Image (spheres, helix red, strand yellow):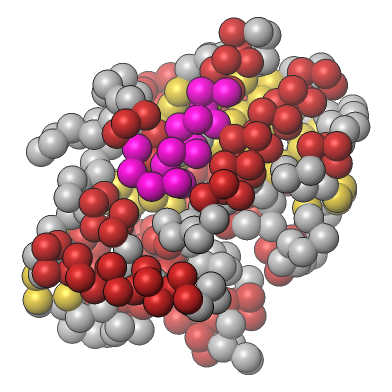
């Protein structure tokens, strides 16, 4: 099989590309001129240049491809220009899917997110939990919700796509890093002295990648599959990371209400200094008001998905971030 992978220079996309190569498939990757090279270094992939922001650049990129794995997305919880995020995540996805239909690609795996799913207060959500656009907090969730709607619309017109909804991946090669990777890195370095009462579903990025291949092989067109791992409170996550890094876990639990003025001030500063990312945002505090717990039972049942324990995922992430800090130059790319 020859597969095109978007986002292959990034965290999840590079894991998908590596999983495909390990399974003996030919891999073509879509890269921008500004894409970081570290995650593709040494990989036997064919590179084509294009940009989701420029639909004309996507024409012909899937020639002779049997499959498309659309992993690329603008994933930031703080963005000064939401319109640009929507152009990439929604309009770019639409253009890419239309190109896949034109090229006659046999199977598409679209990487959505659990961010598009509903939540169950005090419980565990899945693919069928009721949700509406009004439930989406912030541009990232809103744009991914609209992008998934576009994919579903095109599925009704004949797009042979399966949708996967990863939860919160962690692991090696998170070179940016992602918002979750930044949490792991900072906790491992002892820079998170306190926590709020929230929770996440933690999964190893390589298990998410295998879930993509399983969705391609066994997923039903038009269906969604949560690719997650274990549900953990933030306190438990930080305690595990502290133990792995040889540090004391944070013992101070903060109220979200006390952090609200901090978030307002941090966002105001970031708007004045576009290169600065806020320490905490209002959207993050709103999202933290509920535990984001999910079930992968459908993927386990229908795809044969079998993620490893979250502790192993966090251990790999901590080892990579600490190794990157010790690498020449101190940057994550040095450990890729």
Reply yes or no: does residue 262 show up in magenta: no
Q: Residue at x 58, y 82 (%)?
A: 331
Quarter of the image with the C terminus in it: bottom right
Instruction: Give coordinates of residue 20: x percent, y percent.
Output: 69, 42
Q: Name the residue rendered at 67%, 49% in the picture.
A: 7
Question: Which residues are the magenta region?
Answer: 136-150
User: Quadrant of residue 10 in the image?
Assistant: bottom right
Quarter of the rendering containing residue 279: bottom left
Task: Tell me if 221 is positioned left or right of 195 in this view.
Answer: right
Q: Quadrant of the N terminus?
A: top right
In screen coordinates, is 284 left or right of 274? left
Residue 196 or 328: which is nearer the viewer? 196
Taking 221 as reference, is 18 left or right? right
Say which residue appears at 70% left-offset and 26% top-offset. 97
288 or 2: nearer the viewer: 288
- The residue drawn where x is 24% and y is 73% is 262
Residue 93 percent coordinates (x, y): 65, 34
Report if residue 143 is visible in the image.
yes
Residue 11 higher or lower than 220, as above or below = below
Compared to residue 127, the image places residue 180 above or below, namely: below
What secondary structure prevails in the magenta region?
Answer: helix
Q: Is residue 210 visible?
A: no
């Amino acid at each position: 099989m020859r597969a095109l992978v978007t986002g292959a220079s990034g965290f999840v996309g590079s894991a998908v590309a590596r999983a495909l190569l390990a399974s003996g498939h030919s891999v073509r990757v879509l890269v921008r001129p500004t894409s970081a090279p570290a995650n593709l270094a040494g990989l036997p992939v064919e590179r084509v240049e294009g940009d989701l922001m420029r639909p004309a650049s996507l024409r012909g990129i899937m020639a002779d491809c049997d499959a498309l794995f659309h992993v690329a997305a603008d994933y930031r919880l703080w963005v000064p220009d939401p319109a640009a995020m929507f152009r990439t995540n929604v309009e770019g996805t639409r253009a890419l899917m239309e190109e896949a239909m034109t090229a006659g690609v046999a199977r598409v795996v679209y990487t959505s997110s659990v961010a598009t799913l509903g939540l169950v207060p005090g419980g565990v959500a899945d693919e069928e939990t009721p949700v509406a656009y009004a439930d989406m907090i912030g541009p990232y969730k809103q744009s991914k919700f609209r992008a998934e709607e576009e994919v579903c619309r095109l599925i009704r017109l004949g797009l042979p796509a399966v949708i996967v909804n990863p939860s919160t991946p962690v692991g090696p090669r998170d070179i940016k890093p992602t918002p979750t990777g930044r949490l792991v890195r900072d906790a491992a370095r002892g820079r998170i002295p306190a926590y709020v009462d929230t929770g996440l579903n933690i999964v190893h990025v390589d298990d998410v990648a295998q879930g993509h291949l399983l969705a391609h092989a066994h997923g039903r067109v038009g269906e969604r599959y949560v690719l997650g791992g274990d549900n953990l409170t933030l306190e438990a996550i930080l305690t595990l990371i502290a133990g792995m890094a040889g540090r004391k876990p944070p013992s101070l639990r903060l109220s979200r209400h006390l952090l609200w003025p901090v978030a307002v001030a941090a966002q105001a500063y970031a708007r004045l200094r576009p290169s600065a990312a806020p320490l905490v945002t209002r959207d993050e505090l709103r999202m933290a008001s509920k535990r984001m717990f999910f079930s992968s039972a459908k993927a386990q049942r229908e795809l044969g998905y079998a993620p490893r324990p979250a502790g192993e995922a966090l251990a790999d992430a901590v080892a990579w971030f600490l190794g990157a800090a010790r690498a020449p130059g101190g940057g994550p790319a040095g450990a890729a």
